[in-house]
Image (cartoon, helix red, strand yellow):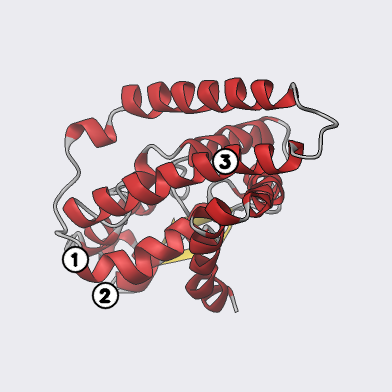
Amino acid sequence: MQKQIKNWTWFLVPVIAIGGLFWPKFGLLLFPIMVTLIGIGIFRGKFWCGNLCPHGSLFDRFVSPFSAGRKFPELIKSPLLKWGFFTFFMGMFVIRVVRVMGSWGSLGFWDQLGFVMVFNYMMPTIIGITLGLVIKPRAWCRFCPMGTVAELSYRLGKKLGLTRNTDLIVSGFSPGKCADCGLCNRSCPLELTPQNALEKEGFQETSCIKCGICTEKCPQKLLDMGKAS
């Protein structure tokens, strides 16, 4: 069921990004999406990004076959880009929403607010597809502002102890059987290092999108995606 959902959430991208240009209220769909992303983030981190995100589904299904498959440049992996872009993106979003709030109560308010959301949604669509073709399908996901929101929610959830019985992490066992082939690391869409799960208490990287691809690629089946102990 989870994979079926992942394979079809992409259809929300053209509905919101393109349909919203003609019917701006489609942009209001982003509010429940954001609430869901934050809610899941508190309990399971970036699980949304790897399993439910419409853009992630689009990148995996339609961009991946045509991607150049290059390694991420250091800039893409840079924390400076991630947090700098997050600050810029959220700052511009807040400014636009504040401007629209001036028309609260008017007939066109919801269309204006919806268009703000559509405009913001166009950014990951255009930039994400471009980077996905030129570099790797999930290049955008390395610094996606909504992914950063999910990561911040996750950190809050961990501090409050809310992830103890709900979180999913990559766990490893029988490290002596590892052939050190590196397939798990190379298969990670974000170029993380899930092989480290064999050396410590699970893969605790907060940027992990919980997609489980690394567990599927391990030829020795030494990795597993499951609840944290």
Please give the name of the residue rendered at 20% of the width and 44% of the height, measured from the top-left corner: 72
Q: Tell me the element at label 1.
A: loop
Relative height, residue 79 to residue 42 (above, below): above
Work out how far the residue at label 1 is from the one at label 2, CA to CA, in angstroms: 9 Å
Work out how far the residue at label 1 is from the one at label 3, CA to CA, in angstroms: 34 Å
Tell me the residue that label 2 is attached to.
219
Foreground residue, 172 or 90? 90
Foreground residue, 117 or 82? 117
Is residue 48 visible in the rendered structure shown here?
no
The three-letter amino acid code for the residue at tag 2 is Pro
Return the x and y of residue 7 as percentages of the image width and height: 48, 74
Work out how far the residue at label 2 is from the one at label 3, CA to CA, in angstroms: 31 Å
Do callouts 1 and 2 mark residues in contact (Cβ within 8 Å)? yes
The three-letter amino acid code for the residue at tag 3 is Ala
- Could you tell me which quadrant the N terminus lies in? bottom right
Relative height, residue 98 to residue 177 (above, below): above
Q: Earlier in the sequence, mark 2 or mark 3?
A: 3
Relative height, residue 188 to residue 42 (above, below): below
Foreground residue, 99 or 83? 99
Label disc, if present, on residue 179 of the rendered structure: 1
The three-letter amino acid code for the residue at tag 1 is Ala
How many other residues sit within 10 Å of disc 2, few (<14), some (14-19) or many (≥20)?
some
Q: Tell me the element at label 3.
A: helix
Label disc, if present, on residue 134 of the rendered structure: none
Please give the name of the residue rendered at 49% of the width and 66% of the height, measured from the top-left corner: 10
Q: Earlier in the sequence, mark 1 or mark 2?
A: 1
Return the x and y of residue 143 as percentages of the image width and height: 38, 37
Please give the name of the residue rendered at 28% of the width and 29% of the height, measured from the top-left corner: 78
Tell me the residue that label 3 is attached to.
150
Relative height, residue 129 to residue 221 (above, below): above
